[in-house]
Amino acid sequence: MLNHLTTETRNERTMNLDQMSAEELLKVMNDEDAKVALAVRKQIPQIAEAVKKIIKSFKSGGRLIYMGAGTSGRIGLLDAVECPPTFGADPNEVIGLIAGGERAFIKAVEGAEDSKTLGIQDLKNIKLTKHDVVVGIAASGRTPYVISGLEYANKIGAASIAISCNKDSEIGKIAQVAIEVVNGPEVLTGSTRLKAGTAQKLICNMLSTASMIGIGKVYGNLMVDLQLTNKKLVERAKRIIMEAASCDFQTAEEYLRKAHNKPKVAIVMLLTGMTYEEAAERLEKNQGFVRKAIE
């Protein structure tokens, strides 16, 4: 059943993998990895379509929900957990679901990915609505857990997106948007944590970053909504304010304090001369976009 999948075929360049020196092996891996970004680039029209659906969802109070099994599920989870500190997103705004639950992130839960029931139940547990977007991730494109999740999303009226590494995938046929990246065979036959995993990570990066930019979480190329959860991020926030408002360190520090540790508000205050209350109100009226708020 797997013979027709590109992700399961043997790579002609690595038939003697076990006879290569470490340097030879690493060069081949690097050469193969270099193909991934180019393969992803071919799917930019589909990725852009997915981003538009996610932005629409966010603007209507919906959520971005990744779901997958094994490596695919872990990649979705990695992207989800980075959104709150990077973009100041609500922890429930971007969610990662993995077959077998959170414990499966560390240790495989046997049989979980083959359960269609689990896929539906996990979405029911988070009360999936028609305003949400479900992104099903499966290198093979045929994982039952993901298939059932996308089918349920369609039934509810939520937007459905599939990320796979095989053409004409099963999940691609179910989803409203099919992102199908063909990287060629893996260096180690069938080990989809390699090129397939890299492709999936690149796509998740694109989906979340472009969507967050689309709802006003970025000014220029600065992450102005980051959460100040540690000393490093506090210092980063000050540098962001310095860059955005062309001010010195002391001024950035002062206005970050005046803005109650909200870099975006501090920037608007500095660029417009507004008080904290005025800047916060202006941002709210402009859906959080700094550029619109300072015009």
Image (tube, helix red, strand yellow):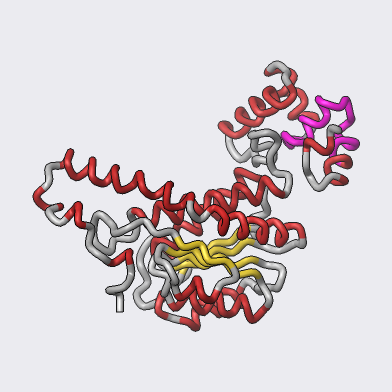
Left or right: 295 in relation to 78: right
- On whether residue 264 falls in the magenta region, the answer is yes
Q: Quadrant of the C terminus?
A: top right
Q: Where is residue 240 in the image (x, y as percent from the top left)?
A: 66, 28
Residue 275 image-quadrant placement: top right
Residue 247 on image: x %, y %: 73, 18
- Measured along the vertical axis of the image, is residue 288 above or below residue 264? below
- 252 vs 80, left or right, is right
Q: Which of 254 and 158 is in front in this view?
A: 158
Between residues 206 and 44, which one lies in front from this camera angle?
A: 44
In the image, residue 66 sits, relative to residue 283, either above or below, namely below
Quick one: which residue is furthest to the left in this view?
A: 19
Q: Give 177 or 67, whichever is nearer the viewer.
A: 177
Q: Can residue 24 be seen in this view?
A: yes
Q: Which residue is drawn at 67% across and 79% down?
A: 156
Q: Is the magenta stretch mostly helix, strand or loop?
A: helix
Verify whether residue 265 appears in magenta.
yes
Q: In the rendered view, does 117 fall on the left or right side of 124?
A: left
- For the record, the magenta segment spans 260-280
